Each structure stands twice: as C-alpha cells, then as structure tokens.
Amino acid sequence: MKRFFYLLLLIFLTSAHSQTNKNKLANGLTVVVSHRESKELVSIVAIIRGGSGVEETPGAGSLLLRLMPLGTKQRTKDEIAQILEDNLIDLQIQINPNYWAFFLSCPSTSLERALFLLKEILFSPLLDEYEFEREKKRAILEAEETSAQPFICAYARLRESIYGSDHPYARLLNGTKESLEKLDLGELRSLHLVYFQPQNVFLAIVGDVEPINASKLVSDIFGVLPRGESVSFHYPSYRSLVHPQADVIQRPAPFAYLLIGIPLPGINHPDYPVLELINTLVGKGTSSMLAKALRWRLGISYELGSLYPPLLGKSHLLLWSAVDPLRVEEAREAIINELSSLDKMEEKELEKAKDKLIGDYLLSLSPIKEQAFKMAFFEAIGLGYHYIDEFPQLVKGVTIRDVKKAVGRYFKGNASLVLLIPSP
C-alpha cells in the first residue's frame, strides 16, 4: 500500500513538472517556472552560487545576506517591510557552503511585485554602515550561543579533521565571535560585487502561474540588467584520509557525544544516489541500522542519526549518537559493526531502504517552496531541474552490487572520530 501511494505521488509530481518552462536571459540569468495547483499561491527561490565557501572571513556571506533586505538604493528598510506586508509576501534567506538563497512566498496576484522587490534586493542593496554594525553585534551574540552548543562544537571539530581547519567546509556557516569582530563592510561589498551577477543567479517559480507568462515577466523585470563579469568556482574534490583519526574534547554537556565522519563525494558525483541510500540504511528512522543496534538492542542511545550533506565536490557521512560516557566504547563498536555488516545486506533490506528514501523525498516535495528550491539548486549545480524527477528513478536502479562497491571504495578504514565528553 505504501509503495502504491509513493507511486501515485511520483506520477502526480512528474505530471506537474511537465508544465515547466526554462529560459536563460541574454544577461545569463536562468529561470525555471513550473505550474502547480496551490490555492493561488506561488513560491519564488533565487539561488546565487557562492555561499560561505567563497568568503575570505568566516561569517561574511551570512552577514551580507542579513543586510541585503534592510534597504536598497530604491527603498528604505521600512518601505520594504511595508511592501512585504501589503502584498502578503514572506521573505526568508539561507546560506550554505555552496550558495546563498532567497525564498519568497506570496499570492499569485503579488508575483510581479515580489519579483521587482527581489531584483532590487539582489542587485542594488544599500549595505548601510549603521545596519551593518547593528547586525554584526547581533551576529556575534548568536555565534557565541551557537558555538557553545556541544553537538555543534563536536561536529565542527569533526569537519576540521576531515577537511582541514582552513577548509571552507570546516567553517561554521555564520562565523565565530572572533571572525565576525574582524569583519568590515568593505568585504561584504566586495562579495556582493563579485558574485551577485545575473549569470550567477538561478531563479525558480512554482505555483499557480502560467509558465510562459511568468517567464516573460521575469524577462521583462530582470532582462534589463547588464551581464556582469564571469564568476568561476573551484569546488574541492574527494580525497581519502591517510589514517583514521580520533579526537577527544571536553565541554559542558548532559551526556557524551560520539561522532564518526567518513569522507564521501558530493551531490554532483555519480555515486550520490547510492551513498544517499546507504545514509538511509544506516541512520534514518527508527528501523535504521543505528537505531536497531543502539536503541533497541543495546538500549544505550535514544538520540542518534546520520547526515550526508548535499555539498559540491566533496562531502561526508556523519554518524552520531548521544550516550552515557561509560558506554561510549560500546556505542563505537556497535556503529563500526553496523558499517561492516553492509557487505552482508539482503535484497529485502535494500528494497525497504529504497522505499523509505524515495517516500521521504517525494513527501518533502509536497510544499511548492521545496520544489522551487530543488529546481533552482539543481540548475545551479549543473544537474538540471529535471533531476528533481530523475533522483527517485536513480535510487530505484541501485543494486546490492552498487552498495557493496561503494562500501569497499569509501568506507574501509577511512573515518574520523570525535568524542565530546562532559566537563567534570
């Protein structure tokens, strides 16, 4: 029954995306528009390639994103707030090591107004000195709170072990107190000047819109912008660790955190669907391998999971568990044993994991906001917006041989470990 439901959802989403128009403007800006019945609502997502991975000082990109909606060369902060309120436009921002993202949700009748405002925010932000100093103080306070959290502290140390301390992927997305204090407005303006160019922007619109008309509207609004300087990217490639590494740190915490990290290729690698399936097998849900071993069999952890970030070039698999400090070694052995047992997987286990991964993926696409994001993101990284429909098919095609091949290539003795134990 569950598989039949997922099949119906896949057919529905695929047919919805068949009403899709893609256009690349003369200035290089890419726009994808997809019609979807959504009670006269529309979601707009703009992806700008760059993110924290291109900043010189950690936290610069995050602070830039906070400043951009706080005034443009055409409108004050209060005027922007009034437009958002009057037109029922919700505006959100997001930073990632590989991109900056702007999310706008509004009624279909507000689409034109939302696009005009988005153009101003993206290409002519004021970046005011007063707002910069105020947001900088707020960012410093937030960074201090974030860095004090034990899991975030341990995960940052693990990424340093995998990538090296000076690597962009090892940084905290919003910077640290020390890095933010060094920031000046000039660095933010330079970031904006280099990366916020039309040919580096990927726009997706999903909802109750007619694709051809909406694409023309984008062309009319954004097409007047001149093409900027070319922007080049050099994303890190996969490399194995020379030796397994371990690190023990102490922080105030209610229990110990055990984190194991395995370097893996990123989302634009052909092995990505196989590795995402392994991630599901190992740590997703109450029936995952980690849950069965640590929660149900040993009864030593009820906070656990896995994460495979969709980074470009080079990523990692994170396996983590919160345990009693006296049972850390039990947890470590159990996790290693579960990874080793991937070689003994049966067809039934693989099919169950496929159903879960595809089902979770399709359900995540129910909000039009998530569909718009994935379309813009897949365009930005070169996979194309069609990958939103292709991914489930790629997962379906994974075999046990594919899984065992990936385990042999990436998982054998190639891990870092961080143990955070509570301070006495």
Image (cartoon, helix red, strand yellow):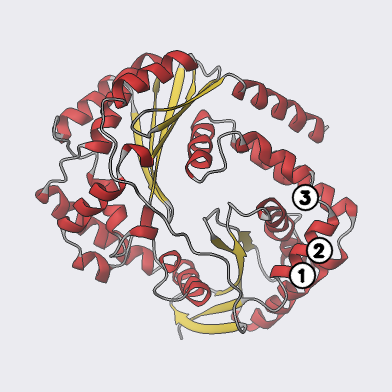
Residue matched to label 2: 404
Rendered-image quadrant of the N terminus: top right
Residue matched to label 3: 353
Q: CA distance from mark 2 to mark 3?
A: 15 Å
Residue 244 in percent (x, y) is at 62, 82
Q: Given the current orientation, which residue lies at the most extreme left position?
A: 130
Q: Earlier in the sequence, mark 2 or mark 3?
A: 3
Residue in the image at 26% along x and 20% along y: 86
Asked if labels 2 and 1 touch by Cβ distance under 8 angstroms, the answer is yes
Q: Earlier in the sequence, mark 3 or mark 1?
A: 3
- Left or right of 373: which side holds 73? left
Q: Secondary structure at mark 2?
A: helix
Q: CA distance from mark 1 to mark 2?
A: 6 Å
Q: Nearer the viewer, mark 2 or mark 3?
A: 2
Q: Amino acid at mark 2?
A: Lys
Query: 204 or 131, which is in the foreground?
Result: 204
Residue 189 in percent (x, y) is at 19, 51
Query: 362 or 266, which is in the foreground?
Result: 266
Residue 414: quarter of image? bottom right
Q: Secondary structure at mark 3?
A: helix
Q: Is residue 372 above or below residue 173?
A: above
Q: Is residue 2 visible?
A: yes
Query: 208 or 190, which is in the foreground?
Result: 190
Q: Residues within 10 Å of mark 2 (few under 14, many from 20)?
A: some
Q: Is residue 55 above or below residue 353?
A: below
* Res. 408 mark: 1
Residue in the image at 16% along x and 56% along y: 185
**Number of numbered discs overlaid on the protein picture:** 3
